[in-house]
Amino acid sequence: MLASDFELLLQRALHTAQPDLFDKPIEVIFKNFDVAESRVRKGGPVNNDVHFAFEKIRLGVATALMQIFTDLGGGEVSEKVLAVLKKAAKATNINQIDAIIQKENKVFDKLFQDLYTNTEGELILDLFARTLEADSRREMNQIVKETLQALENLEFPEEENED
């Protein structure tokens, strides 16, 4: 996965050139991920730094997907999930991320219960579910690419003007 693809996804999904999603700039988050993964490839230990760096990337992609789903009309539950993801993205260690997600775990369950959505929503939810299960850079790269491609074809509801 390229840093530019990750940043582009966040910019497009969050509707801003400078997403303020993490506790640090996006470039730093991605560089930390790159460095941690590089150390492991060179035979270094898989430690909390690696897990934390990957979780930050996962949270970025998951947040982007949930924002897209919400923009497609995901409703109140998707807004709650989005708020939890954004809060977790600000965490400064893996234990904080785990605590935030575990505390709000029920909202994630509600997202997939009794859900009726259109084909576009189903596509985004599928990518979201794959993001939560992904455990490699290769998988995250594929999800980011598929999401960027989907963004080219999604039709978002028009916002009604209240005149």
Image (spheres, grey):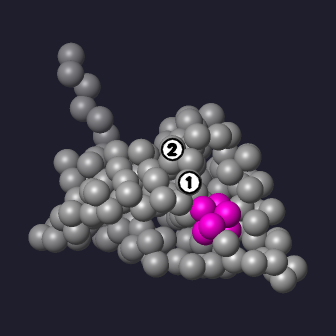
Q: Residue at x 27, y 57 (%)?
A: 104
Kindly give the residue lying farthest to the left in the view shown: 114
Q: What residue is shown with label 2?
A: 90
Q: Is residue 68 above or below residue 116?
A: above
Q: Residue at x 57, y 79 (%)?
A: 135
Query: In this view of the protein, can residue 76 be seen by the observer?
Result: yes
Three-letter residue code for mark 2: Lys
Q: Report the front residue among 95 and 31.
A: 95
**Part of the protein shown in magenta:** 48-53
Is 103 placed left or right of 4 in the picture? left
Is 97 placed left or right of 100 in the picture? right
Quarter of the figure with residue 100: bottom left
Kindly give the residue lying farthest to the top in the view shown: 163
Q: What residue is shown with label 1?
A: 93
CA gap, disc 1 and disc 2? 9 Å
Q: Residue at x 77, y 54 (%)?
A: 31
Q: Report the front residue among 26 and 104.
A: 104
SS for tag 1?
loop
